[in-house]
Amino acid sequence: MQIGKWGRGDRSRKSFSIASPNPQDFCDNLKDKQFRQLFESMNEGFVLYEMIVNSQGKVVDARILSTNPAYERQFGWRREQVIGKRLSELSPIVNSAWLEKYEQIVKTGQPLTIEEYSPLADRWLLANAYTPGPGMVAVVFTNITEHKRMQEELARAREDRFKKCFDNSPDCFAILRAERSAAGQIIDFVHEYINTAGCLETGVSEKDYSGRRLLDLYTGFGTASLFEQYCQVVETGEPLKIDAISYSGMGIASLDGVCGANVIKLDDGIAVTWRNITDKIRLEEELRRRERQYRTLIENIPMVICRYDRDFRHIYVSPAVETDFGVNAEQVMDKTWQEIGINQTLYRSWQREFEKVLRTGQAVAGDVELPDAQGATGYYHVQVLPETDEQGRIETLLTIAQDITKRKQAEEALRQSEERFHKAFHGNGAMMCIVRTANDQIVEVNQRLLDVIGYTRDELVGHTFQKLNLWAEDHKRAESLLGEIRVKGNLQSFEFCLRTKSGKIVTLLASTSLLTLHDELCRIYTAQDITKERRLEAEMQRLDRLNLVGEMAASIGHEVRNPMTTVRGYLQMFQRRAELAKYGEQLTTMIEELDRANAIISEFLSLAKNKAIDRKRGNLNTIIRSLFPLIEADALRMGHEAAVRTGDIPDNEFDPQQVRQLILNLTRNGLEAMQGGGRLTIRTYLSSQAIVLEVQDTGSGIPDEILQQLGTPFVTTKETGTGLGLPVCFRIAERHGAKMGIQSSSQGTTVCVAFSDVLDIDETKRERH
């Protein structure tokens, strides 16, 4: 070990410089007052070393030749303790790195700036070292500990902001430092940082990541090409983008699913950003699947679907355009209607609708006529729909054209069918009615039914027959008939009676069947008014019975009356004999009874059809006035009132005797039908060219079951009646070509006799009122 012999220089040269190459010159400078003051007061520590080298010329130690007070404060040594001392004598630890740098300065003569933590001074120092002469190194030490602290605080602040930024990022982020072999080859990557999202995604804590090698965590990287790609990023600086990769099976921190990643170079390492895109890939695959399904649907649906840009150019046309219009989809792509050669009228119409959609943003729809692939006219229902971008601006228009030709034809056929049904229903001479099967409500009626029953359509529709009290049948009969209709559904030729709005009863012959109307099961009734037919049948039956009784009366009347005349003569003779005077009262009674029987026989004989009538011209009012005193006397005797209301009627030809009998029979029946205090009214008037005689009482009325049989011989409601009064009246009316009708209610009974070939009781009543 010896002091390096790089020479000591010329001691005779004097200069005023700390950097003097001669130690003696430096010491001489210290004797200068100004230099000494500067040297002693400077804040930077100063030390002058003499290098100690070994036999190979390598610096192995250094001896302190001079220091200033600042140096003493920095290292805690007094000057007298260190001058002439080697560094190895002052501290057992000599920083070889510093000695190597000192050797470099001595050999090259180039100054160096060294920034390093000094264990001897226990602080960070910035050393500016140079060589003032051969074998010597002068070092000026600046204490940068506070500066270093501030740098570290600033670095920590930057790191905190960095961590906050990336820890709150939804993307995973990690920084890895390259670990190299002695030969400089990358053999692994060490984790220096990973954000919260990365820890959550991989299931490894930040603590377990810190300082861990990549291949320790992801064992599969060693055999995967991904490690080589990471190395290439570091070596080339070219970033790496990985669209999709699965980390499954690569190690203990394997990721679940598929990730996308970006890798960039960062110093001698990499920064990796990745995101789990499993859901995204699944959604994209689902979207592709739905797009395939949508395309399959669109291309196979029997509708023509087109998409247009804002210039009305076709940007999509479904294959159905060829089937419907005989045009290949490729022929119309990227063309407007004008370029295709569409009819100008149709073009302008469509253009107006398209512009309306663009202007309002509202879809439009309508039916249009278009020539089909065969050139025939087809009907299409066309919808024009706006398609918008994310900002709600209309980008394209979508049209959907559906062939509705068959539907139109079906609608036309249905319309014609409904028209025929309407005409057949409303123009039918029979009464027709449609009723819902669900609730028996009336759905529709024709005019003929309205004419017969006197209601308006609004009064019937929505109501039931029961609610309107239209059924004139007794409850049991009505329920039985309705039950049979519900069970059988279809029922032919059944009779029932309806009550008109005016209260008149009409008899109908009806049939009913089921039908579907507007998707609703209904029942249609068809009926004929057979009231007159049934009345005529009843009249014929009554007349048949009258004829039968008349024939009987004609054949036996005289045979019965002749013996009775003989008996009456003998009784009168017995009355004149004195010896039989004591039997006078009994003989009188016998004669009266014979006279009563004779009167009955006379009435019976009056039923004879072939009885002659003696017609004379006269006025019905004259006969009524002549009979009225007798009628009024009978009424007063029975406690009733009688009134006559004769109208202006013309003369007519009739048998006065039979008409008197007719009037007396009718008035007697009316008086006997009333309780005390009743009123009998006799009227005459002209109605529909018929002279009408009307006799009205205020009795309790005639029961329906008796009313239907009136006019039949021997039918009576009187205890002592013969039942021949009304049959005689009917026969007298028949002989005079008149018709007789009876109306009865709880307020009384009215009998009308119309001396004409035609009788309508309701018309005569309306005319009178």
Image: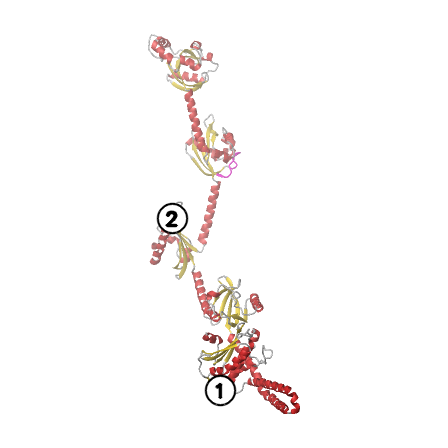
Task: State the CA–CA distance, disc 1 to disc 2.
Answer: 102 Å
Residue at screen point 39% across, 45% down? 391
Q: Residues within 10 Å of mark 2 (few under 14, many from 20)?
A: some
Question: Callout 1: few (<14), some (14-19), or many (20+) C-alpha neighbours within 10 Å?
Answer: some
- Of 135 and 158, nearer the camera is 158
Q: Which residue is mark 2?
A: 394
**Disc number lying in front (1 or 2):** 1
**Residue 518 placement (x, y as % from top left):** 48, 62
Confirm or deny contact between disc 1 and disc 2 (CB under 8 A).
no
* Residue 573 % position (x, y): 63, 91
Toward which corner of the image does residue 68 lie, by quadrant? top left
Q: Main secondary structure of the magenta part?
A: loop
Q: Amino acid at mark 1?
A: Arg
First along the sequence among labels 1 and 2: 2
Q: List the residue tagged with mark 1.
A: 615
Q: Does the stretch in magenta take in 196? A: no
**Residue 512 screen position, x and y as percent:** 53, 68
Q: Is residue 519 above or below residue 681?
A: above
Whether residue 268 can be seen here: no
State the scheme by which the image is colored: secondary structure
What residue span does the magenta drawing correspond to? Answer: 248-258
Tell me, for residue 113, which label it has, or none.
Answer: none
| Residue type, mark 2 in image | Ile
- Relative to 39, say whether 627 is above or below: below
337 vs 79: above or below: below
Q: Residue at x 45, y 35 (%)?
A: 169
Depth check: 358 or 174 in front?
A: 358
Query: Which element carries disc 1, helix, strand or loop?
Result: loop
Q: Which quarter of the image is occupied by the N terminus? A: top left
